[in-house]
């Protein structure tokens, strides 16, 4: 295998980092940055990196880990809950798209086997791009967002049969049905063997591995399982990606799923990035320039056909016209699994170079158009479906009718468990409330039970105003979504600067940000949970109730400052909340020659850096919260609270001056 040079790796990483920063600045998905990096440095671009076999090996590894994570996230209950959308709408979309694009390719002279593969490639949409943009636009829980997710879920799953089909189509001259039958039989045997062995051995094996409490041991075992599964299926004449999918699916059924996700995430993201870079390197810019008209026609045909098909199928599945069209718009592009199938098909020589280049260019350009189409899907639906806004207005009328019954009520944003508990407490005190939620099943069931709940996106101004924002007594955000919460706070403060707003958050990481955005009170779940546990413990230990109440009151009055921050150990880097900007506690022991020895805290000006001195421990005794007149001595343990960058600077001040 030809090796890729060290200088090529540096060039590749440097260009990828620069383009990632640039695409992030203009809020474009990182997938496009990797593709652009590959086009730029590849053999058909500037030619900085030759098309060596080592780069294609990296692409194969990226594909292996992509399929592993899909298997890890495979959820049978989720499929059952969304079976109508997943298997109905998703199955119809993939089948009709495969047939339509396959017939077009066959009509243009592509052999039957290659035409089938092209149909499968173009039927796929981009999960990475669509879900990222929908989440950014707060549309992931909207009706078109949920339908799009169901179709994407089916597309992810249907890749597995295609990975079995492609090697069969590339048989050695035997009839296709004979080759396909043998491949399916072989696949069934391999699948049964792997899943049976995995079901009986994997859980006890990983129990022993996890009990060793060695992170490297656990991570290496996951990598070994992934690559071993890929090797077994390849040895059986199937694809690497199929074995990786099975390995992920087996691990996804164990209690170690979340730890596996945390450990595999860095490898997956890096290798997936290299996978997209190598795909971009395959795009022949000379072919693009020579056949630009044909490629643009292919891109336009792909976008228009998939949009129209999903919109028509959506109507057949009883969607509103506007919702069906928006679902089609967000799924109109090609996707990363199309690249995966194209890579496997190229390895088996099912497509000639010209056909492969045309398909690759169409998928890449459609993905580059996706951010614009997805971002403006609502406006396009409004223009193309005149009655769509009337349907939205009808929903607003329902909200207004419900809100008109109440005055000085509480608007509850989100009707999950927290929202329902809040509504129950308000009901006990005869305080009227109106809840807004985006789960239609939950809203229907709650309304059938006589609860004051309506369907609506509380991050939209017209919805909040219809819910009676002008005359409400208070507003509560009961879900944990900082982006949506900030939008709600912005709208509320524009309309009602004086109204109390209570916000829920997971921890203290976003507390100050939410407070500055206009939240009257921010309730961090982790801190309130600690406070309640401590209260119960003190009560069981015989501490008088009056003192417990005073402790709780003092903590809440001080906006949780006494509890905020904690000592981050090495394991905290596995947790989602341990991001780089979270404030935390940090202890520093002052040696005799430290510059802060003999100085007053006031003289150090640590507050200007953004750091508070939480405590000073001297001679094994921790005193009360130190004041500015506290003089530091050698051997003191100074407990600081602040953001990581500020803590680093404060440590330099204490030790070096």
Image (spheres, rainbow, N blue to C red):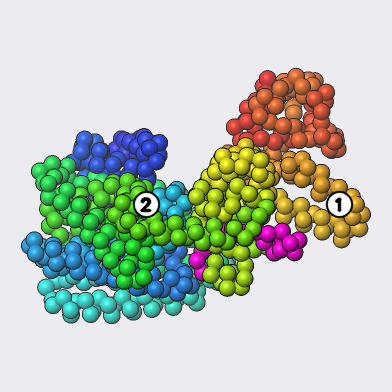
Residues rendered magenta in the picture: 422-441
Sort mark 1 into few (<14), some (14-19) or many (20+) by Cα contacts within 10 Å.
some
**In this view of the protein, which residue sits in the foreground, 478 or 559?**
478
| Whether residue 527 is visible | yes
Horizontally, residue 477 falls left or right of residue 393, namely right
- Tell me, yes or no, whether the highlighted magenta stretch contains residue 433: yes
Q: Is residue 551 above or below residue 638?
A: below
Quarter of the rendering containing residue 388 = bottom left
Q: Residue at horizontal 77%, vertical 56%?
A: 532
Residue at the spot of label 1: 548
- Tell me, yes or no, whether the highlighted magenta stretch contains residue 115: no
Horizontally, residue 513 falls left or right of residue 199, namely right
Q: Is residue 180 above or below residue 210?
A: below
Horizontally, residue 530 falls left or right of residue 301, namely right
Which numbered disc flags the more N-terminal residue, 1 or 2?
2
Sort mark 2 into few (<14), some (14-19) or many (20+) by Cα contacts within 10 Å.
some
Give the x, y percent position of residue 621.
86, 38
Element at badge 2? helix
Q: Residue furthest left?
A: 109
Q: Residue at horizontal 60%, vertical 47%?
A: 470
Q: Which mark identifies residue 331?
A: none
């Amino acid at each position: 295998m030809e090796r890729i040079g060290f200088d090529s790796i540096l060039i590749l990483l440097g260009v990828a980092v620069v383009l990632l920063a640039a695409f992030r600045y203009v809020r474009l998905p990182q997938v496009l940055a990797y593709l652009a990096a590959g086009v730029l440095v590849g053999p058909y671009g500037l030619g900085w990196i030759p098309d060596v076999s080592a780069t294609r090996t990296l692409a194969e590894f990226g594909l292996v880990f992509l399929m592993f994570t899909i298997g890890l996230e495979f959820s049978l209950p989720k499929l059952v809950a969304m079976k109508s959308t997943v298997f109905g709408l998703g199955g119809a979309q993939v089948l009709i798209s495969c047939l339509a694009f396959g017939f077009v390719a066959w009509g243009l002279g592509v052999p039957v086997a290659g035409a089938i593969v092209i149909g499968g490639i173009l039927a796929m949409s981009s999960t990475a791009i669509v879900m990222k943009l929908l989440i950014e636009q707060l549309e992931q829980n909207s009706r078109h967002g949920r339908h799009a997710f169901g179709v994407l879920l089916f597309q992810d799953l249907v890749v597995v049969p295609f990975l079995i089909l492609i090697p069969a189509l590339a048989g050695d001259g035997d009839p296709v049905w004979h080759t396909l039958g043998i491949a399916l039989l072989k696949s069934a045997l391999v699948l049964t063997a792997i899943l049976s062995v995995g079901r009986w051995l994997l859980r006890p094996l990983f129990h022993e591995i996890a009990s060793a409490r060695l992170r490297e041991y656990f991570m290496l075992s996951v990598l070994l399982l992934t690559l071993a599964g890929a090797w077994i299926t390849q040895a059986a004449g199937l694809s690497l990606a199929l074995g990786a999918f099975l390995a992920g699916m087996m691990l996804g059924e164990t209690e170690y799923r979340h730890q596996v996700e945390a450990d595999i995430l860095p490898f997956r993201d890096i290798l997936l990035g290299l996978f997209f870079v190598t795909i971009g390197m395959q795009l022949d810019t000379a072919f693009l320039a020579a056949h630009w008209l044909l490629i643009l026609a292919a891109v336009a045909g792909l976008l228009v056909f998939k949009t129209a098909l999903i919109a028509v199928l959506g109507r057949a599945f009883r969607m509103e016209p506007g919702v069906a069209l928006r679902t089609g718009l967000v799924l109109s592009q090609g996707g990363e699994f199309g690249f995966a199938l194209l890579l496997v098909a190229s390895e088996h020589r099912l497509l000639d170079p010209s056909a492969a280049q045309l398909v690759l260019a169409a998928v890449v350009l459609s993905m580059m158009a996706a951010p614009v189409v997805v971002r403006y899907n609502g406006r396009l639906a409004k223009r193309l479906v005149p009655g769509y806004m009337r349907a939205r207005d009808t929903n607003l009328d329902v909200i207004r009718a419900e809100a008109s019954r109440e005055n000085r009520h509480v608007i509850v944003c989100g009707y999950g468990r927290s929202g329902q508990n809040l509504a129950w407490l308000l009901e006990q005190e005869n305080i009227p409330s109106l809840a807004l939620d985006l789960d239609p099943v939950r809203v229907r069931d709650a309304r059938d039970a006589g609860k004051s709940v309506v369907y609506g996106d509380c991050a939209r101004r017209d919805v909040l105003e219809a819910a009676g924002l002008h005359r409400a007594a208070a507003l509560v955000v009961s879900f944990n979504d900082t982006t949506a919460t900030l939008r709600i706070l912005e709208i509320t403060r524009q309309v009602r600067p004086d109204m109390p707003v209570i916000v829920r958050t997971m921890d203290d990481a976003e507390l100050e940000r939410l407070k500055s955005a206009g939240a009257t009170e921010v309730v961090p779940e982790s801190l309130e949970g600690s406070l309640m546990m401590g209260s119960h413990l003190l009560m069981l230990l015989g501490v008088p109730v009056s003192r417990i109440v005073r402790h709780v009151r003092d903590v809440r009055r001080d906006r949780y400052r006494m509890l905020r921050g904690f000592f981050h150990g090495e394991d905290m880097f596995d947790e989602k909340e341990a991001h780089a900007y979270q404030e935390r506690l940090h202890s520093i022991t002052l040696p005799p020659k430290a510059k802060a020895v003999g100085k007053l805290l006031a003289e150090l000006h640590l507050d200007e850096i953004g750091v508070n001195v939480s405590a000073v421990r001297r001679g094994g005794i921790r005193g009360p919260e130190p004041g500015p007149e506290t003089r530091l001595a050698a051997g003191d343990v100074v407990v600081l609270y602040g953001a990581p960058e500020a803590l680093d600077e404060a440590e330099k001040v204490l030790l070096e001056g």
